[in-house]
Amino acid sequence: MQEYASLDVPEKHWLPVAFSAGGAYTAPSSVTAQARANYGDTAPYGMSSYEEPIHRRVCEEYGAGQLWHDNRDNLCFVLPPRIRDEGISQDKLDALAYCYRYDSRDRCVWRKLPGCDAVRYVYDKADRLIFVQDGNLKGQGRWRFTIPDALGRTVLSGLCSDTLPVVGSPVEAEFTGSGSYKGYAVKVGGTVRELSGSRLLTVNYYDHYDFLGKNGFPAYAYDSSMESSGYGTKSDARGMLTGSVTVLAGDGAGQLYSVVYYDRRSRPVQRQSSNSLGGKETEYTAYNFTGQPTRLCHVHTAQGKAARTEVRTYSYDHAGRLLTVKHKLDALGEVTLVNNVYDDLGRLQSKSLHGSAVNKQTYAYNIRNWLTGVSGSKFTQNLYYNTGNGVAKYNGSISSMTWKAGNESTVRGYKFTYDGLDRMLNAIYGETAGINTNANRFSENVTGYDKNGNIKGLQRYGQTGASAYGLIDNLTFTLKGNRLNRVDDAVAVSTYNGGFGFKDGVKQANEYTYDANGNLTKDLNKGITNISYNCLNLPNAVTFSDGSTITYTYGADGTKLRTVHKIGSATTTTDYCGNVVYENGVQKMLLTEEGYVNLTGTQQYHYYLKDHQGNNRVVVNQSGTVEETNHYYPFGGVFASTTNVQPYKYNGKEYDTKKGLNWYDYGARHYDAVLGRFTTVDPLAEKYYSIGMYAYCSNNSVRYIDPTGMSISPIYDEEGKLIGTDDEGLQGEAIIMNKSNFKQGMSHEEALSHSLGYNGLADEEARSNYLESYTSLKDRPDYDGYLTLEEANKWYREGKGQPLFTSLAKIDLSGIYSLGEKYVREIKSFNLLLHSGSLNDGLVYGNVTLKRYPNHSVRAFSDKYDFEMHNGRNPLNWGRNIETIIGNRVAGRGQPYEINIYGSAKLTPFLPWIK
């Protein structure tokens, strides 16, 4: 039941109880109390909205935080929970609040994140963002610019020392071939203008190839010799990105060039790119009828180095799911990297590596499609939610887990406890299946969080002697806002044999300092006296007190190209050229989808055996011999490792231990597992106002992963546009892929198989599109996978016809029964007003079309939300049409839209013995 105040503003929601209570309604307070009892959630349904009678939002509350809006409904302030407890002052606002200012056209022109200097924005007359200046750029007297072409596509980005008078005029770049900016001329109001002190970062070309051989761009002509091998034929490229220039970030002058050729279906069939070692990366791609890649040839060259030629072959089943990936390197024979098998619900059932049963992993799930086990001869893991040895959890968080890895006979495990906001408190280590032997040897406990989700205290147990174990870290964090100021360790015990743990190098104020953008610049406990950054907030150099340095080279698109470690008198240079990794000028390894090939000595394939989070637990060679075994603390530290043959560890990220740095490289940020914090601000911090900007995975590192260091986790194309979801919905891990590979509701595993990563975004405009969309996902009515009638009607009025995505598991199908397995593959429609226990679901979806699968499971087709009348001559439509008339009057004017229903559900058998 819904109660309304004046002018139809929703005021109260009342929730129905079972018919046994006489059709009465339950007060929200009772539902809240029951949710707290069942799930331990301290703030269920915890967002209130206060509105003026004319529908203007004034304030929204989430937990103990507040979002304040101006009289034009622009968000002006976000006051996180801590600020309400500690009181509002200018210092507190600077350290903790999100602040925004707008111009007369409601464009954000000033934005300040907690603890950071303000960011200023300048738009042209066409409302396009042209200039941005953050705190670090302001200190340098520079601005970052992005210039679009006549169609609004970003073609130029870079840095300059001053802005142009663009507020009253449209700005665009026109390709003339002789323009000052790699063939482009910048025009303001139709007049060519020059940017003072400019330095280009990226250049994009569309529609044509007139840029080849001009302005330093190599003459990468189309290679037609591969057409006879089925790699596609060049066709028209209008509307497509055809070329790009990427400058090395920092103060380097190097430039990387890339050209892309497309077939008649606008699919890239050939890509030629220069690399940072003076060579070239060339890719040829062949597709099947549905647009999935079937074969990919990659040729890598570098000056004075051996060329490498890879051929990947992909096969798919009738549903488009990836079955096999075959790989051929140079003159080596072709091998099957992975062979996937799926169950009747489309879930990954098993995968075999190198075509061998020795390297096979099998997966098990519960009725909610949550992973419950990974089994194989070299790695086994069991996950428990509401069963097992921990405190039962029903919300998807893991209550306990066990694993056995490598050649070990020991079964290890953790039991987890969480607070009311689902943040991890205790990870209690034990051995054997009961997790009760050798207890606490490697436990990790959070002793407190502040109200912004920053860790205030951390205890860690580990090995202290050859056969001794105990408390190795008892840390107290001192914070200034969300920033770390100092860390004190109450335990003086050192870890055995230089093992993982905190090193309390100094005891003073300001052990950690930050720059104007919130990037860590000093960590005295590790002896780091300075960290400098480029304009992407990625590190240029880390300098230690003894003069040792670690320097980084990035492309302006954020791709890491080189790392140089100068530790004492030793220098180690690592170059990253696509998937080929060099060390001191020698080809060391070639990365594959499932592991790597060593390029020194006798070439062999090596494979990663991963747990539920993608952590590399075991490394085996092609024969199944164990080469490395890793055991991790919940926050990612390695507490035991048999050997160290390769650097990719927790979440599959590169782990840099040199000089005690102990950072994981997540791409967009670096992560310090010793402290459970990132070193720089979350680029998507405004998606999670209630969480500190340096926190890792909402402080639930057992359940969540952070694939790029940007967020907890929707599918985007290479232009940064949301194109749909896999079967995990909008709250799953964000995936970027070529849209020709996308199918709505595809399995998560298949989606991951097509993932291009963050670097798959085509250009600066794509990255901007992606960030804008991703940061606003939480504001969508379908973010939680469920749609109320009020939300559906509001989207009908305001959603501009854009689709929504909901979970079938959250739709009440209690009035629909399974009649047995003989009906598998049958497709049938049901009116949920007659076949559901939820009036809301009946009113939102009306008729829902289901397809039967084995084991009483169903999946749903998309549903259109509209108010069109059905054939009135059919008496079966009379009731439906009456509901449509009423619904249309309630919803008002709007645009119809699709509701895509992802996931699966299980029906109740009509009779208990029906199979």
Image (cartoon, helix red, strand yellow):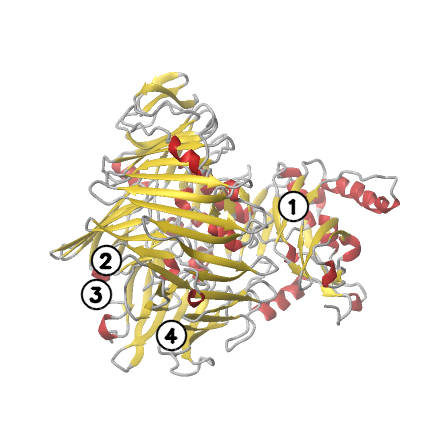
Disc 3/disc 4 C-alpha distance (Å): 23 Å
* Residue 699, percent from left and from top: 43, 62
- Sequence-wise, the earlier of marks 2 and 1 is 2
> Residue, x 27% and y 44% (percent of image)?
307
* Residue 258, percent from left and from top: 34, 34
Q: Residue flagged by tag 3: what amino acid is it?
A: Gly
Classify mark 1: helix, strand or loop.
Answer: strand
Labelled pair 3, 2 in contact (Cβ < 8 Å): no
> Residue, x 75% and y 72% (percent of image)?
913
Q: Residue flagged by tag 2: what amino acid is it?
A: Gly
In the image, taking residue 725 as reference, residue 284 lies left or right, namely left
> Residue, x 28% and y 82% (percent of image)?
468
Q: Which residue is mark 2?
A: 601
In the image, taking residue 489 as reference, residue 875 lies left or right, namely right
- Sequence-wise, the earlier of marks 3 and 2 is 3
Label 2 or label 1, whichever lies nearer to me, is 2
Disc 1/disc 4 C-alpha distance (Å): 45 Å
Disc 4/disc 2 C-alpha distance (Å): 40 Å
Dot 1 crowding, Cα within 10 Å, few <14, some 14–19, many 20+ = many
Disc 3/disc 1 C-alpha distance (Å): 56 Å
Q: Which residue is mark 4?
A: 443
Residue 505 image label:
3
Disc 3/disc 2 C-alpha distance (Å): 40 Å
Classify mark 3: helix, strand or loop.
Answer: loop
Classify mark 2: helix, strand or loop.
Answer: loop
Disc 2/disc 1 C-alpha distance (Å): 55 Å
